[in-house]
Amino acid sequence: MVSFVLCTTIPTFAKPKTLWLVGDATLTEYTPDTTTNTEVCGWGTAFEPYIHKRIEVVNIANIGMSAKVFVETGLLEKMEKLRKGSYVFLQFGTNDLKEKNPATYSSPEAFTRHINKIITTARRNRINIILCTPLAQPFYKDGSLIDRLGSYPDEIRHIAIYHHLPLLDLEQVTHNWLIGLTEEDAAAYYITLHPNQLVDGEYQLNEEGARIVAQMANDAIKKGKSKKLKKIIKKTH
């Protein structure tokens, strides 16, 4: 008599990897606890529908966050506890350049040191860093878009090249977008538009503005060469 043993293989599924969204108010997830304005929206919130379902998104971006704040307030140590293979979007620069705010300000040289420390820590813990340049600001003078971000976006670009890291150059794509708009047109995508208050506050996206930036981020990833970035978003045909 021949006996047959039925073997069944139960598929095992890897635990979902985590994607941390780390940056300033333009990226954060707004809740009733953080704002009473129901129209304000960070592009990170609008970007979540594009992210692969096997990735758990944790948005820790916050108003006033900078690379200095991230390193000096214990968030760097918390990042070390992420699962190996997890992802971290880093979008700094907007608050780092504000010399009038010592709590967030870093000179370009100190800014580079902070970012390098985050990268070194991430690599030691096998965490994938994706560098993002800050969003261009809708600051217009005599009808022309004015750059108010200084050398900080270039610092990030140089760091990405030096460390061979994926770069999501949102400053470039949002600059190209805003340069094609008038100040009045741009105002439709923001909560307020007070160019003379740029140093003291940020331009906050509304839901439509956040949706446009998220779409541009998704398009940039799809068109880019980084296979690591492409793994984060859903495949579309």
Image (cartoon, rainbow, N blue to C red):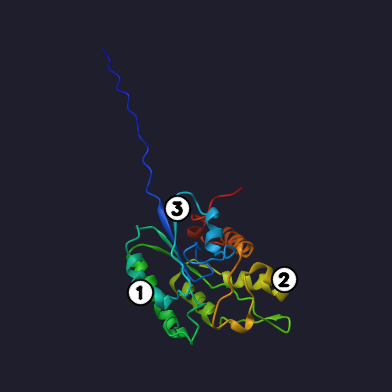
Q: Identity of the amino acid at label 3?
A: Ile
Disc 1 element: loop
Quadrant in which the N terminus appears: top left
Image quarter for residue 151? bottom right
Q: Residue at x 58, y 59 (%)?
A: 218
For marks 3 and 2 on the same chain, the one whose residue lies earlier in the sequence: 3
Distance of label 3 from label 2 (alpha carbons): 35 Å
| Dot 3: element | strand
**Within 10 angstroms of label 2, few (less than 14), some, or many (20 or more) residues?**
few
For mark 2, what is the residue?
A: 185
Q: CA distance from mark 3 to mark 1?
A: 26 Å
Q: Which residue is mark 1?
A: 73
Residue flagged by tag 1: what amino acid is it? Thr
Q: CA distance from mark 1 to mark 2?
A: 38 Å
**Left-right relation of 85 to 23:** left
* Residue 179 in which image quadrant: bottom right
Residue 46 position within the rendered picture, expressed as x and y whole percent measured from the top left? 56, 59
Q: Residue type at mark 2? A: Asp
Q: Which residue is mark 3?
A: 55
Q: Picture coordinates of residue 228 (x, y %)?
A: 47, 59
